[in-house]
Amino acid sequence: MLDTRFANTPQAEGLPHPQAADDSLPAIVVKAQEDARCRLALARLGYSKVRSAYARHKRNGTHTFAGLGHESLWPTMDFVRDWLKSERSRIVARAKWPFLVTMLVTIVGGIAFAAVAAMLG
C-alpha cells in the first residue's frame, strides 16, 4: 500500500520539486505534501475567512472545500473542519495566559485598593 504511486505528482503538475523529474513519489508522501500545502494555504487565508467559507460550503452540502481552488488545492470538508478545530485551540491557547495574567493583576489591584480604603477609612 505504501509503495502505491500517484500520477499527479508535483513534477507532473509542473511544480518545482528537489527530486528528479522521472522519480515518482509514494502516495503517502504526495498526500503529506498536499496536506502541508493545504494547511499553509488555509493559514494564509485566515481563520475567519476559512470559517465563513466553510459554513457556506456546509450549507450548500459540498464535500470539497473550493476556497483554495485558486491554488489548485481541493481539501475535503473534514480536513478543513479539523484545521479549524486545531486553529481555534491554538488561538485560545495563545490568548489564555495574557487573559489569566490580566485577571490576576486586576484581582490583586482590587484587593490592594480595598486594603488602602480600609486603612484610610
Image: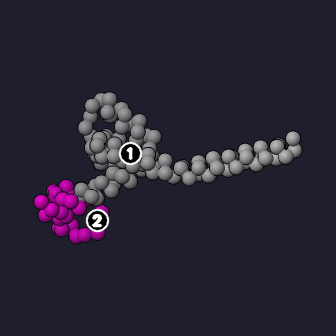
The answer to whether residue 12 is seen in the rendering is no
Amino acid type assigned to the residue bearing label 2 in the image: His
Kind of residue indicated by mark 1: Lys
- For the point 29% across and 41% down, the residue is 77
Quadrant in which residue 31 is drawn:
bottom left
Whether 37 is drawn above or below 54: the answer is: below
Q: Position of residue 47 (x, y in %)?
A: 44, 44
- The boundaries of the magenta stretch are 1-29
Q: Is residue 88 above or below residue 15?
A: above
Q: Earlier in the sequence, mark 1 or mark 2?
A: 2
- Image quarter of the C terminus: top right
Give yes or no for contact between labels 1 and 2 (Cβ–Cβ under 8 Å). Answer: no
Q: Nearer the viewer, mark 1 or mark 2?
A: 1
Residue shown at 68% from the left, 46% from the top: 106
Which residue corresponds to mark 1?
Answer: 85
Q: Is residue 4 visible?
A: yes
Give residue 17's mark: 2
Q: Residue furthest right?
A: 120
30 vs 18, nearest the viewer: 30
Residue 27 is a magenta residue = yes
